[in-house]
Image: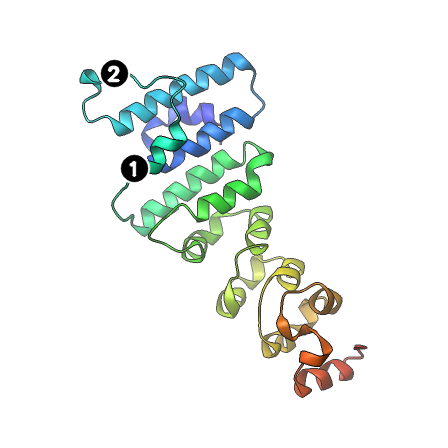
């Protein structure tokens, strides 16, 4: 979703957690100086509306105001699941405008709900993320075996093999889906080294023809 579309046509959907991501999208997106300046002016108007109880009695927020710093000072009441999903959907649309902010943006998004762990936010909104965005999540957020099994169909198996932590039993169960060379040579699991494997896994791999 283009930030200008949000600012011009969906102002009522923008919330405080969206302000910083829209600013990043305007600064890093494919816009000329004139359009960028126009976007920042619209963004500050929305920011003023969200943060000023009585706009008619307050001074306008300067275009050069450090929006990101001001947003960090604000606190809000706990959000409902529906509100979280709405925010995530809106901010993902903003993040997608600029590929340069994808990985950083997704990580920042999942960490932006102070009272909710990133894993809880991801599980609540997993269906909203694209395959590329999910891959970026798998590179730093450990999902745990229960969630790996739950979202197995939409997760990249190479990313699971390389970045995720799971038990030997889980690996044996999903052996055919997880590249053995990635799991044993590039993976994160502490048991992947020959001298750390259980006799059970050692025998299983030998029966599969894997040289240790």
Q: Is residue 98 above or below residue 161?
A: above
Q: Position of residue 21 (x, y in %)?
A: 45, 34
The quarter of the displayed image where residue 154 is located = bottom right
Task: Determine which of the numbered discs, if any, sits on residue 74 in the image.
Answer: 1
Q: Secondary structure at mark 2?
A: loop
Q: Position of residue 147 (x, y in %)?
A: 49, 65
Q: Is residue 155 above or below residue 101?
A: below
Task: Determine which of the numbered discs, if any, sits on residue 59 in the image.
Answer: 2
The quarter of the displayed image where residue 122 is located = bottom left
In this view, the residue in front, 109 or 91, is: 109
* Residue at screen point 29% across, 23% down: 48
Q: Position of residue 43 (x, y in %)?
A: 39, 23
Question: Which quadrant, please, contains the C terminus?
Answer: bottom right
Q: Position of residue 177 (x, y in %)?
A: 67, 67
* Residue at screen point 62% across, 69% down: 189
Asked whether, in this view, residue 182 is left or right of residue 174, the answer is right
Q: CA distance from mark 1 to mark 2?
A: 19 Å
Q: Are marks 1 and 2 in contact (CB under 8 Å)?
A: no
Asked whether, in this view, residue 156 is left or right of residue 40, the answer is right
Asked whether, in this view, residue 131 is left or right of residue 78, the answer is right
Sequence order check, earlier mark of 1 and 2: 2
Q: Is residue 202 above or below residue 123?
A: below
Residue 140 visible to an observer of this rendering: yes
Disc 1: CA contacts within 10 A as few (<14), some (14-19) or many (>=20): few
In this view, the residue in front, 54 or 207, is: 54
């Amino acid at each position: 979703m283009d930030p200008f579309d949000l600012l011009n046509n969906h102002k009522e959907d923008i919330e405080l957690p969206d302000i910083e991501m829209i600013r990043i999208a305007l600064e890093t997106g494919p816009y000329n100086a004139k359009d960028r300046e126009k976007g920042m002016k619209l963004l500050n108007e929305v920011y003023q509306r969200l943060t000023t109880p009585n706009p008619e009695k307050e001074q306008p927020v300067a275009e050069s105001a450090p929006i990101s710093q001001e947003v960090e000072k604000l606190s809000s009441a706990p959000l409902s699941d529906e509100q979280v999903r709405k925010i995530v959907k809106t901010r993902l649309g903003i993040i997608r405008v600029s590929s340069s902010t994808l990985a950083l943006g997704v990580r920042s998004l999942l960490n932006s709900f102070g009272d909710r762990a990133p894993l809880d936010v991801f599980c609540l909104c997993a269906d909203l993320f694209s395959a590329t965005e999910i891959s970026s999540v798998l590179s730093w957020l450990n999902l745990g075996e229960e969630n790996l099994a739950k979202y197995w169909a939409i997760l990249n198996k190479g990313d699971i093999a390389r970045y995720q932590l799971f038990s030997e039993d889980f690996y044996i169960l999903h052996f055919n889906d997880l590249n053995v060379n990635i799991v044993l040579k590039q993976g994160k699991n502490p048991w992947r080294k020959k001298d750390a494997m259980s006799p059970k896994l050692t025998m299983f791999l030998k029966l599969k023809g894997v040289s240790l």
